[in-house]
Image (spheres, rainbow, N blue to C red):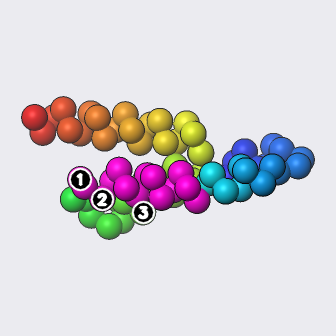
């Protein structure tokens, strides 16, 4: 969402990818059996920061899975 502050004209495809990226984040997080507040926090983080937020979330998921193994 922060990207929309810096763009004067928002392309329609960008508006469609924000909820899509939030949904993909939810798909990744639902298998980890986290508390609901943690899942919502990560989804909000991904939506707010867009692609960098999604990359950080994926890194955190990989780190968490390696710790469990």
Q: Does 65 sit above or below residue 40? A: above
**Where, quadrant-wise, is the C terminus in this rendering?**
top left
Residue ID for mark 2: 30
Q: Badge 2: how crowded within 10 Å, few (<14), some, or many (20+)?
A: few
Q: Nearer the viewer, residue 45 or 24?
A: 24
Within-10-Å neighbours for mark 1: few <14, some 14–19, many 20+: few
Given contact means CB atoms under 8 Å apart, are the residues at marks 3 and 1 in contact? no
Labelled disc at residue 19: none
Q: Residue at x 18, y 32 (%)?
A: 66
Q: Is residue 9 left or right of residue 55?
A: right
Do the CB atoms of the residues marked 2 and 1 lie less than 8 Å apart? Answer: yes
Magenta residue span: 19-32
Whether residue 25 can be seen here? yes
Left or right of residue 28: residue 34: left
Q: Which residue is mark 3?
A: 40
Q: CA distance from mark 3 to mark 1?
A: 13 Å
Q: Which residue is mark 1?
A: 32
The residue furthest right is: 8
Question: Which of the two labelled residues, at mark 3 and mark 1, occupies the earlier sequence position?
Answer: 1
Could you tell me how far apart the alpha carbons at marks 3 and 2 are, in whole angstroms?
11 Å
Q: Residue at x 37, y 34 (%)?
A: 59
- Residue 2 placed where, x, y %? 69, 48
Q: Secondary structure at mark 1?
A: helix
Residue 53: percent from the left, percent from the top? 52, 42
């Amino acid at each position: 969402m922060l990207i929309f502050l810096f763009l004067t004209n928002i392309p329609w495809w960008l508006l469609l990818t924000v909820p899509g990226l939030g949904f993909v984040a939810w798909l990744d997080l639902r298998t980890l059996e986290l508390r609901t507040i943690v899942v919502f926090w990560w989804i909000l983080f991904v939506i707010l920061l867009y692609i960098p937020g999604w990359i950080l979330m994926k890194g955190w998921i990989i780190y968490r899975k390696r710790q469990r193994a």
